[in-house]
Amino acid sequence: MLVRFSSKKQSLSMHEADAKQMIKMMGMSGSIPSAIDAKSLPAAIAALQQSLSNQTGNDDDNNTGNNADTNVNIDVRAQPLMQMLKNAEKKSESVMWEYQGNRL
């Protein structure tokens, strides 16, 4: 299942396991669907950056095992989301996430 993150002008999709992990790393509950308002973005970005830096160098923790290419570390997979969060912060936009397509 894919999860779609979106702001007013951007969207991206990622595998559910990776999305939930990154949502939790932002200090959120991990619930899907959900959202984060513009005022809360700086804290979420800082929490995600801190969590990613804490995992750097530990290959076993950097891979969720659910990605088709398990050789890609989570800090690399997080970069598109990190960029989206930073762009939304600059524009004072909220970011939401939901399942892409129908969830059975």
Image: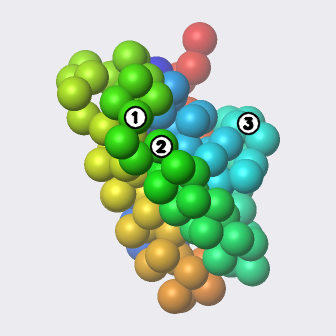
Give the residue number, with chain letter if any, for mark 2: 55
Foreground of the two, 35 or 23: 23
* Rendered residue at 47%/43% (across/down): 55
Tell me if mark 2 has few (under 14), some (14-19) or many (20+) residues whose alpha carbon lies within 10 angstroms of its own. Answer: some
Q: Are marks 2 and 1 in contact (CB under 8 Å)?
A: yes
**The C terminus lies in quadrant:** top right
Give the residue number, with chain letter if any, for mark 1: 58
* Circle 2 SS class: helix
Q: Position of residue 49 (x, y in %)?
A: 52, 62
- Residue 31, disc: 3
Q: Position of residue 102 (x, y in %)?
A: 53, 23
Earlier residue among tags 3 and 1: 3
Tag count in the figure? 3
Q: Is residue 61 left or right of residue 23?
A: left
Report the Cα–Cα distance between label 2 and label 1: 6 Å
Q: Amino acid at mark 3?
A: Ser
Q: Position of residue 45 (x, y in %)?
A: 58, 67
* Rendered residue at 57%/36% (across/down): 21
Q: Position of residue 33 (x, y in %)?
A: 69, 40
Position of 22 relative to 60 (above/below): below
Q: Are marks 2 and 3 in contact (CB under 8 Å)?
A: no
Foreground of the two, 57 or 14: 57
